[in-house]
Amino acid sequence: MKRELLLEKIEEYKSLMPWFVLEYYQSKLSVPYSFTTLYEYLKEYKRFFDWLIDSGISDADDIASIDIKTLENLTKKDMESFVLYLRERPSLNTYSKKQGVSQTTINRTLSALSSLYKYLTEEVEGPDGEPYFYRNVMKKVSTKKKKETLAARAENIKQKLFLGDETMEFLDYVENEFHTINEKNFNPVDSLILSQVTNYFYDDIVPNICNLKPPVYFKDLLKAEYFNKMFKSFIKPKKNKHLLFALAASPRFRDIQINYHISKIDLEAEKQFSATTFIINNEFAYLGFRGTDTTVVGWKENFNMAFVSPIPSQLEGVKYVNTVSKLIPHKLFIGGHSKGGNIAVYSAMCCENNIKPRIEKVYSHDGPGFREEIIQSCEFATIKNKINKTIPYSSLVGILLANHEQYYVVKSNGVGGIMQHDPFWWEVGENDFIYMDELSSKSKYVNKTLNNWLSQISDEKRKQFIESLFEILNSTKLENITDIATNWKTNLPIILDAIKNMDPEEKVLILDLFRQLARLSVKGISKSDKNYVVLQKKQ
């Protein structure tokens, strides 16, 4: 739906709503929720309020007149009656001949109502500084996930892993957003897109920070002989190639100049670092830091954050910001995905003081947090209010270590924390991401368990654990995580043998990590495979 039509529809629904929904709308607009998300929620509220009046629960003459007390006094039985109504009545789609709505639609309706109730009972401040009421009936209402066979689920995931549903909204934004950044402000989705293309390998393609050659454009990268090099770090390069073509055609991105590329890998120093500058227009530039690539040394550096501060790539990031800032006069956006987001925050907080006023925003997309001493530092305080941190609903990477930055939870279709880490799974609305109220229960559990464990052990113990983990990875004699993940039949017996003599607590954590890595494999392992069974049962 085009922005103008979307806003028109939103205003139409807002004109029908009671005052407390309008307050909710304004509050969520400041989060910000995308207009698409708010539009869908308003549709669900109209459906619900119409039912309240039609069923006689509310004696209001119209939706706008519904009393907030009606919501406060609703019972679990009332909500169950509403769910039954949804199952029996036609959908909002007037062309549908089906009776009742799908379980997916019911779940979406209940999610919208849960968000409203949470606002009214926890988030809002009334005149006395308290919520409007405390009784949240939605906490007593459970949702039912749509069932599907394992075979159907596997096929669905398989299709998405190549170039399926996960890429559509991400690419749709690039292909259908015709406003230039001069016409519509730079936003978090733009940042994630540039963070993603920062992960391309530009060596000898984009001018480096030393030779100061003229910049290139996305269209200049559309050469078949470049593709193998540029996309070598991706398990499935097809969707990234699709993204590159879309950027080269897009009026929002095609005039961006790409320059000042740098890439360093140092096995001895356990450093993997790369950065690229994107000159957006005459006013703004984006300094993007590459996230963790698929090399084992790149992943090792990620884990080193648990006991080393700063890591080598963070120091490289500071040096890069200081250097590029002297080459260009622009205001700066600094960002990255995964480890790149962490480096973006660190480089912004530790760069030269005269640069900091030029920094407009720092974007960390599912980037790990920091050790507590960093969070409490004066340097962090100088840029804390400029940080925009986004993490997917079932985040695994972005919840690591301390996260005192305010973060926004993005709806994602990925299966499991590692797949949700992939930006192509993140859902995009009209002008922003589609946001959720909170992390998944599993993500919160992992966050609490892992960070509690880390807080109870010394740096030396953390280092020992990480060294043990990567000794296991190195026992496969492979240098690339994707090679390890996609050759499980060969590597799993080696890994299990290496785990035998580890401490029980470390063994549990490492086995859980390898279960996550196993899900990256497109071929996977047969559930009858004896090594798969051992991995599942091993404690």
Image (cartoon, rainbow, N blue to C red):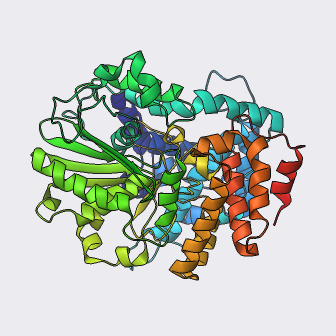
Quadrant position of the C terminus in the picture: bottom right
Question: Looking at this view, is 442 or 315 the one in front?
Answer: 315
Instruction: Classify 4 as above or below 284.
Output: above
Q: Within the image, what quadrant is residue 97 found in?
A: top right
Instruction: Classify 8 as above or below 94.
Output: below
Q: Position of residue 71 (x, y in %)?
A: 58, 62
Quadrant position of the N terminus in the picture: top left
Q: Residue at x 53, y 72 (%)?
A: 133
Q: Position of residue 74 (x, y in %)?
A: 65, 63
Instruction: Classify 420 as above or below 57.
Output: above
Determine if residue 386 is in view: no
306 sits to left or right of 333: right
Q: Residue at x 20, y 49 (%)?
A: 332
Q: Within the image, what quadrant is residue 215 found in?
A: top left
527 sits to left or right of 448: right
Instruction: Classify 19 as above or below 490.
Output: below
Q: Position of residue 431 (x, y in %)?
A: 36, 38
Q: Residue at x 58, y 78 (%)?
A: 461
Q: Residue at x 49, y 32 (%)?
A: 232
Q: Position of residue 348 (x, y in %)?
A: 25, 60
